[in-house]
Image (cartoon, helix red, strand yellow):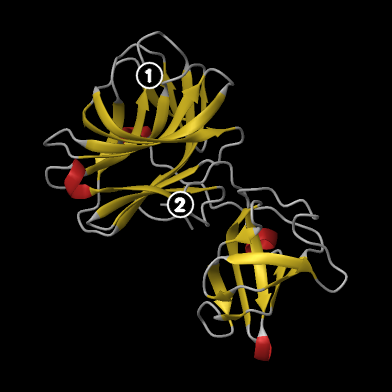
Amino acid sequence: MTILSNARFQLLNNAKVATATTGTGTMTLGAAQGGAQTEASAGAVNGNMLAYRIDDAGGAWEIGWGLYASSGRTLTRNLDQSSTSSKLVLSGAAIVSIVARQEEITRPEANPSVPLAASFTPENNGGTSLTDGTGSLLLNLHGANAGLETYEQAAPGATPYDVVARIETCMDTSGLTAGIVLRESGSGKGVLWGWTGDNSNASAGLINQTFTSFTSFSGAYNAPVISHPPNWLRFHNDGTNIYAYLSFNGWDWVLVNQVTISSVFTSAPDKMGLCGYPGTGGNFQYAAVTYFGSGLPS
C-alpha cells in the first residue's frame, strides 16, 4: 500500500545528482553533479512527486516520476519511457536529473465531463440535493438525513473497470464526507472513497471505508489531513480487489488503499456513484463534481 498525504508535482531548478543505487528499485540520491545542485538545495519537498531523467552507462536513459522522501533523500521510480522500454537496471554510477516532462509543460488537467443529475438514482436521500450546474454537478448536504446518501448509476457489468470523479468540497465540521461509492444493491454493502471534514483546522482528510448499510461502517482508512487536497478520486475494480487512487491532474495516479471484494460484498458491486454523509446537526457541506464516469478521463 502506498500512502499519499499532500503530494503534488514539483518542478526544480538545475537539480542533477549522482546515485549509487543498483537495480530497478527506489533510488537514493547523492552528490550534485556538473555545476548543478542537489534536489534538497533546489527545494524539493518531502512527499512531493518529481519527474526525473536517469542517464547510465552506454547511453542508457529512463524518464519517469517518483515520490520524494527527504529522509534518506530517496525517489521512487514510475516508468514513462526508456531506451530499453523498461526500467533500467542501474549500474551504481548513474546520473539523475530532475526535469519537466511533456506532461508538466503541455498537458493540462484532464478534461471535465459530467452526466446530468437526472441520470443518477438517489438512495437513502433526505435533505441532500444533486443539481446540474454550469459544467458541473452540485451536491448540497445540510444534515437533514442521518446515514450515508448516494446517487447511483449501474456499474459496468464486466471487470476490470474504473470509477473516476473530480470533486471539490467545502465542509464545516468533522465527520461530513463526500466522494465516490461502489455498492451492491441486493445486500446494501459497499465501499466509499472521498474527503471527510476536520473542524480543528478547516481542512479535509481522506477516508476509504466499507459499509454494510447506510448507517453501519467499518474498516476505515484515514490519511493525514491535507491542506491543499487534490481533486481526482478513482476506484479500480479488477474483479478481485477494489483499489483507491488519488491524482492532482487526472493523469498520474497514486495508489492509496485497497480492499478485497470478497471481504466486503456478498457477490460484487452493481452500482457506482457519488456519496455524501451529512450528519444530523444541520451542518453545511458542498461539493462540486466536474468529472464523473466509468472510464479514465481523456
Rendered image quadrant of residue 60? bottom right
Q: Which residue is mark 1?
A: 278
State the SS at label 1. loop
Q: CA distance from mark 1 to mark 2?
A: 29 Å
Chain-order first, disc 1 or disc 2 = 2
Q: Amino acid at mark 1?
A: Pro
Rendered image quadrant of residue 157? bottom left
- Tell me if residue 110 can be seen: yes
Q: Residue at x 77, y 67 (%)?
A: 31
Q: Which residue is mark 2?
A: 2
Percent across and percent down for residue 166 are 48, 42
Percent across and percent down for residue 85 are 51, 82
State the SS at label 2. loop
Q: Amino acid at mark 2?
A: Thr
Give the camera-side residue of 203 and 27: 27
Label 2 environment density (alpha carbons within 10 Å; few <14, some 14–19, many ≥20): few
Label 1 environment density (alpha carbons within 10 Å; few <14, some 14–19, many ≥20): many
Foreground mark, 1 or 2, reads 2
- Tell me if residue 269 can be seen: no
Q: Residue at x 55, y 41 (%)?
A: 230
Give the camera-side residue of 227 and 33: 33
Q: Is residue 110 left or right of residue 45?
A: left
Percent across and percent down for residue 244 are 38, 47
Q: Is residue 235 left or right of residue 265?
A: right
Give the camera-side residue of 252 and 205: 205
Give the camera-side residue of 75 and 296: 75
Rendered image quadrant of residue 238? bottom left
Q: Residue at x 27, y 53 (%)?
A: 241
Q: Is residue 253 left or right of residue 126?
A: right
Q: Is residue 274 left or right of residue 97?
A: left
Percent across and percent down for residue 40 are 75, 55
Q: Residue furthest right?
A: 35
